[in-house]
Image (cartoon, rainbow, N blue to C red):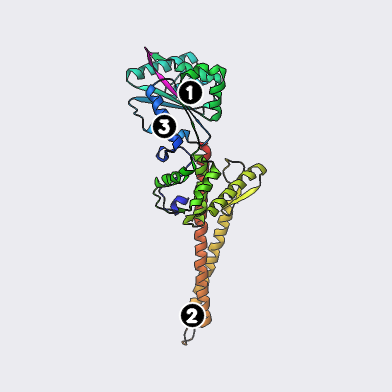
Amino acid sequence: MFDNFYGLTGKPFQLTPDPDFYFRSATHKKALSYLGYGLAQGEGFIVITGEIGAGKSTLVAHMMENVDSAQLTVAQVVTSKLNEDELIHVVARSFGLLIDGHDKASALSEIEAFLHEEAREGRRCLLVVDESQNLSVGALEELRMLSNFQLGNHPLLQILLLGQPEFRDLVKSDAGLEQLRQRIIASHHLGPMEKSEIEPYLTHRLGQVGWEGNPAFDQRVFHELYESSGGIPRKVNQIVNRVLLLGAVEERQKIDAALLQQVLEEMAGDNSAGATGKPVEVASAPVMATGDDAVAQIDFSKFETALGERDAQISELQQAVVELANAQESNSAEGLDPQIAALNEQIAKLESRMFEQERTIRQTLSMLIEWIESEMEATKAA
């Protein structure tokens, strides 16, 4: 993909959470402070909310990379719409416990025994529940009951809840969650990055993969990138991925506002095609968009046909060169016929140009394949 063209050692704007790319924006620094405070208390609930793509999972990945596993055992659950009994079994599995059958009482007993054993070994336990907005009030109450496990006066389990903005609203307003609200010891809502943070965000992520100024960015790009993304990290990543891909295809050493605008128009076209089913073009290749998260379907046979035609033309030119060489040998001693010399030079130029066209087509095809693979990874992650 573009990482090869720009000499990068990896993919700086991948959509899956990676603690190596954690960026300390103002809102993330504040969230990390709340997390640190909450973990120091060793009990109750910590709640972190934010828009889709705000960086909740990256924040937690960064936290988990820095915890001491000898002192803290962490289990993570990514929820779907689980009922109370299903949630208990999922929690048990997240701690590595194998429960025979579907008996809730047995699962609770195994979890409690595990928490006691960890406490005797000097380790605290943290349960991270992602996508908490999918949980029912009843399931959240089950989590509250798990937080009641104690060894003497020592709480055995602390719970970190991650969710979208509607989860914050649920926790604040639902009458059935009053007891859970009273157990929340730290809470933070991750907002978007500030306008001034877009440039350092980009340079930080690029710097993690060996960026040394290629490509360069016009200052206007950062302003317009903020306006188009709203400062949401994942949206920034999506846009910049497309910008760098187009920049590589067009062999740009500098990213300007015009290139960014071209990408934004293409992305808007992708969205509209998702509703109408009309095809859109990406990098001159036929693409059918079927939705925001759809993977582009490219007709690679057209590339293969074009490459085959190039090979045939080059073969014909090579044969013509051989025939001309034979004609030169049989030419009179007066020297090379000027007409033959001119044709020979013209054919050499055509052959060189066709070779360059073939190289460009193959390079573009390779970039498109890598782009599709990255889109498939992003779709799975979403």
Identify the mark at residue 328; answer none if there is no mark: 2
Q: Quadrant of residue 165?
A: top right
**What SS does tag 1 mark?**
helix
- Which one is earlier in the sequence, the residue at label 1 or at label 2? 1
Which sits in the foreground, 353 or 278?
278
Q: In the displayed structure, does residue 67 sit left or right of residue 160?
A: left
Tell me what residue is drawn at x 67 percent, y 44 percent.
Answer: 276
| Residue type of the residue flagged with mark 3 | Leu
Judging by the rendered image, the residue that carries numbered circle 1 is: 90
- Which one is earlier in the sequence, the residue at label 2 or at label 3? 3
Whether the magenta-drawn stretch holds residue 4 is answered as no
Label 2 and label 3: CA atoms lie apart by 79 Å
**What SS does tag 3 mark?**
helix
What is the x, y in percent for residue 27?
A: 46, 35
What is the x, y in percent for residue 211?
A: 40, 50
| Residue type of the residue flagged with mark 1 | Val
User: Which mark is nearer the camera, 2 or 3?
Assistant: 3
What is the x, y in percent for residue 250?
A: 51, 57
| Residue type of the residue flagged with mark 2 | Gln
Tell me what residue is drawn at x 32 percent, y 20 percent.
Answer: 122
Judging by the rendered image, the residue that carries numbered circle 3 is: 32
Residue 267 lies, with reference to residue 307, above or below; the image says: above
- Which one is earlier in the sequence, the residue at label 3 or at label 1? 3
The residue segment tinted magenta is 151-160
Label total for image:
3
What is the x, y in percent for residue 19?
A: 41, 37
Which sits in the foreground, 91 or 12?
12
For disc 1, the neighbor class at 10 Å (few under 14, some 14 to 19, many from 20) is some
Q: Please say if the residues under marks 1 and 2 sit with CB atoms less than 8 Å apart.
A: no
